[in-house]
Image (spheres, rainbow, N blue to C red):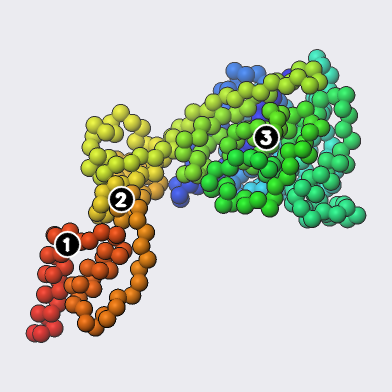
Amino acid sequence: MKLIHLSDLHLGKRLNEISLLEDQRYILEEICQILRQEHPDAVIIAGDVYDKSIPSAESVQLFDRFLSRLAAMELTVLLISGNHDSPERVSFGASLMQRSRVYIAPVFDGTISPVILHDQYGEVRCYLLPFVRPAHVRAHYPDEEINSYEDAIRTVLAHIPLDQTVRNILVTHQFVAGASLCEAQEREIGGTDQVSAALFSDFDYTALGHIHRPQSIGTDTIRYCGSPLQYSLSEIGYAKSITAVGLEEKGSVSIREVPLKPLRALREICGTYLELTEKKNYENTNTDDYLHIILTDEEDVPDAIGKLRMIYPNLMKLDYDNQRTRTSQQITGADDVQEQKPFDLFAALYEQQNNQPMSETQQKFLQKLIDEIWEEEDA
């Protein structure tokens, strides 16, 4: 049996206020093409279908079309909600969708019934556990001591009557300790919701969602497939893929990454304003990519973002890397301010803020402004 493991679609995501819906439509089409080539028996979607619990109409329409295409390919779909999803909204119509072999985890009610698939080696039992918090689990197991995510997941799994003579698959959306995060997820997740990989040791394959970097935790069979697109600037340079899982007899599992190529890459480029606007330096690149541009000019370029977007329309963020930004100084009040000349006060402030003195041109301009102000006051 072959499974394709997806997660963290985050449909409707905006990055630096730019909608990624067109890019998501493109990558879902690419995934459909891969599915036609791979001929899997089932597709796993391990949570975070949407980026928000109340998704936009366009996001819902896009996912509806994607599911319809999977059903048209006669693929079994195993779907759970993630922490970004509303489980009630994601599971709407779940009973009806089963007729098209689309199995959606219901709102957690304390029990998990398997979806049973078959191949020449017998049964494959697939358990769908959506994202749950300790409070969700505690409500259904009041006699259990549940104070953490670890306690919650352990309690849920302990109440699953696993038959170890058959192959068992778990689909869940949690943060497993030891996972490598991108910088943005480190800030978002923190660490209080960690669970240990040992909780999943009884399953032949654990299809995880929640972490955007593809990786296995502890063993090859406990795996995050990652998100299909780069969803933060801290993911620049991270290749994206989906995971193909091959199941043979009990204990025989093969795992392979299938690379994805986005419509637009997320890139970082660095140089002076003149270098980045010189045609020979950008004419053979994809200027429509999503870019983080770092200017190395010592002086700020007036309206740099507006000018650069004439060439790079999807510029997402602009920073400077120069003497001023590399050196951090604390700005303090001037001593004996009444005894200092206005020119000296402004020059000292400029140097503290920019970590470099004014240029000769700036000094002349400043002195001219000061002279004009004094002339107006004396008139």
The amino acid type of the residue labelled 3 equals Ile
Give the side of residue 53 with respect to residue 229, left or right.
Answer: right
Q: Name the residue under label 2.
A: 322
> Mark 3 or mark 2: which comes first in sequence?
3
Residue nearest the observer in this picture, 35 or 137:
137
At numbered mark 1, what does the secondary structure look like: helix, strand or loop? helix
Q: Residue furthest bottom?
A: 378
What amino acid type should be assigned to the residue bearing mark 2? Asn
Q: Where is residue 354 in the image (x, y as percent from the top left)?
A: 29, 60
Farthest residue in the front direction? 335
Classify the position of the N terminus by image quarter: top right
CA–CA distance in space, label 3 to label 2: 40 Å
Residue under numbered circle 1: 362
The extreme top residue here reads 120
Q: Do the residues labelled 2 and 1 touch (CB within 8 Å)?
A: no
Q: Mark 2 packing: few (<14 Cα in 10 Å), some, or many (20+)?
A: some
Provide the secondary structure element on which disc 3 rests: strand
The percent position of residue 50, horizontal first and vertical second, equals 61, 44
Give the label on residue 217, or none: 3
